[in-house]
Image: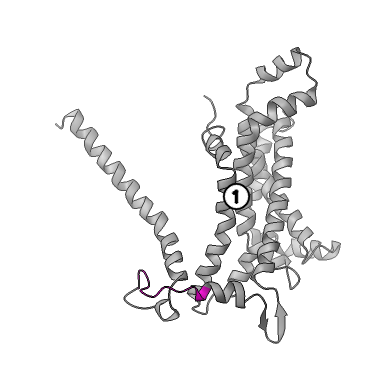
Amino acid sequence: MLKRSSRKLIFSALRYSILTVWLFVVLFPIYWIVATSFKQSSEWIAWPPVWWSNDPTFSSYFYVWISGILNKSSGTEVLGPWASFMNSFIIAFSASVIATFMGAVIAYGASRYQILTDRQLMATLILRLIPPFVIAGPLLLWFSTIGLEDTKLGLIFLYIITTIPFALLVLKSFVDDIPIDYEQAAESLGAKRYQVILEVIIPMLRPGIAVTFLFLFILNWSEFFLALILSKSDISTLPMYLNRYGGGGAYGFQAALSIGATLPLIVIGILIRKHLVRGLSFGFVRKG
């Protein structure tokens, strides 16, 4: 029989070994994308693989972000990377803000006034789990009829609908963890209902709002299929633009675009990092 200290040492070694392998699995794709973005074109598919170029270059970044501002395809001028970048940011940011606000309002009502039961809340998430290709046809017909096809407003509206269930479920757990005693104490001191919400609920809910917003922004920023279905030529998002380099072996160009597409997420995460730390450690785990 192994001693208790020996078993503990073995389990610790096993745990850290598994975590180390998992860390490698998570970080290696990020490293490979960064390395590929700086490689010469002859090194993209070289064998044995080039782990890091001896002659790193910014040519891929220059091609996709500067010389590729306006590309021509079949004699037709199409939106370039910066236009697609701004479209993605406007659509994802607007949809995330509105969905987070609406989710917070509904979550508060569901938590304090039971306007939705737990079964109904779960039903909203189940509806969101319907595969997008199932509803793509009806959505395209509907949006074409009401004039929202190939417009920013149409994509914002669609992204709001598809992300509200996530916002609702996440924010409700945060609201549930705010003791109702705080609200009752504020009301007993003469605070109006709107004052309770603005001065008590919202400050305590701020970390949850930050986490929810970033989560929705990531979902909306990376959405490809629905944007592809509902867009033609006037609107192009960054994932759609990235797809133009797919299938042709242009791995360096894809990597350079991917790095640029990731930067806004990193910047927003840094800006709200204080609330993220609190939000990730509070709210998701329900009190027993």
How many marks can you see? 1
Magenta span main SS: loop
Residue at the right extreme? 146
Identify the element where label 1 is drawn.
helix
Q: Is residue 90 visible?
A: yes
Q: Position of residue 65 (x, y in %)?
A: 60, 71
Q: Quadrant of residue 180?
A: top right
**Residue with the most extreme top position:** 188
The amino acid type found where label 1 is placed reads Ile
Q: Is residue 58 magenta?
A: yes
- Position of residue 88 in the picture relative to residue 153 (left or right): left
Image: magenta residue range:
50-60
Residue that label 1 marks: 268
- The percent position of residue 288, horizontal first and vertical second, equals 52, 24
- Please determine whether, in this image, residue 9 is positioned above or below residue 93: above
Residue 250, relative to residue 127: is it above or below?
Answer: below
- Residue nearest the observer in this picture, 142 or 189: 189
